[in-house]
Each structure stands twice: as C-alpha cells, then as structure tokens.
Amino acid sequence: MPQGDKSKYTDKQERKADHIAEGYEKRGVSDKEAERRAWATVNKDDGGGKRPGGSGRGKDTGHPAAHKGGEKGGKAAASRTAAERSASAKKAAATRKRNAEHHTRH
C-alpha cells in the first residue's frame, strides 16, 4: 500500500477527516495543511485505518482523545459543597441580570 493511500480507512473515518479539515480551513489553514492535520488526528484517535490488512489493525483503541471530554468535566463542581454551588449560581444569575439591564438601556 503506497504512502498516502486511504483505502484502509472506513467511511466514518473519512467523514471525520473531512469534518476536521473543514474546521481548519474555516480558521485560515491551507487546504493541504488542513488535510494533513485532519488525517493525523484520525490516526491519533483511531490508530490508523480499520479495514482488514496490515499488522495490528482493527484493535480497540481504548480512550481516544475525542472521548475524554466527559471525564475531565464535573470535577470542580463535585468537590464543592451544595452551598458553594448555590452561591456561585446566584452570583452568575445576578451577573446575567446586570448585563441584560446594561444592554437594554443603550
């Protein structure tokens, strides 16, 4: 399989790469560089192409970067007491109210 051949990637991986590349292009990255970064990201997340052929393909990748978001969130809130969370929510509500009043006056 020549370098750069995408025949071992699944349709889902190709869609994922296209979507990632679009995001880079919207931020002003050149088409070629966006494509390179997108496939690098797919490889990082999925460990390369998943169709049969080649050594070590088709294995579970464990926890790719894209699936770690839920683990990282919530720790700050969980370590605070109910009173602290409530106070924070009240402060946020007051800020939103103050900002809304400020924006309606102009």
Image: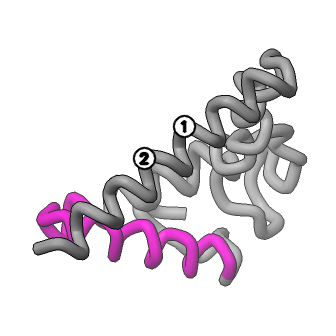
- The residue pinned by badge 2 equals 95
Residue type at mark 2 is Thr
Residue type at mark 1 is Lys
Q: Residue at x 74, y 53 (%)?
A: 54
- The residue pinned by badge 1 equals 91
The secondary structure type at the circle numbered 1 is: helix
Most common secondary structure along the magenta stretch: helix
Magenta part of the protein: which range?
12-34
Q: Residue at x 77, y 24 (%)?
A: 75
Q: CA distance from mark 1 to mark 2?
A: 6 Å
Q: Is residue 63 visible?
A: yes
Horizontally, residue 62 falls left or right of residue 98, namely right
Q: Residue at x 84, y 19 (%)?
A: 81
Task: Please tell me which residue lies in front, 77 or 63.
Answer: 77
Is 28 colored magenta in this rendering? yes
Could you say where residue 46 lies in the image, as x and y percent from the top left?
Answer: 69, 52
Circles 1 and 2: CB atoms closer than 8 Å:
yes
Q: Residue at x 56, y 56 (%)?
A: 42
Is 91 colored magenta in this rendering? no
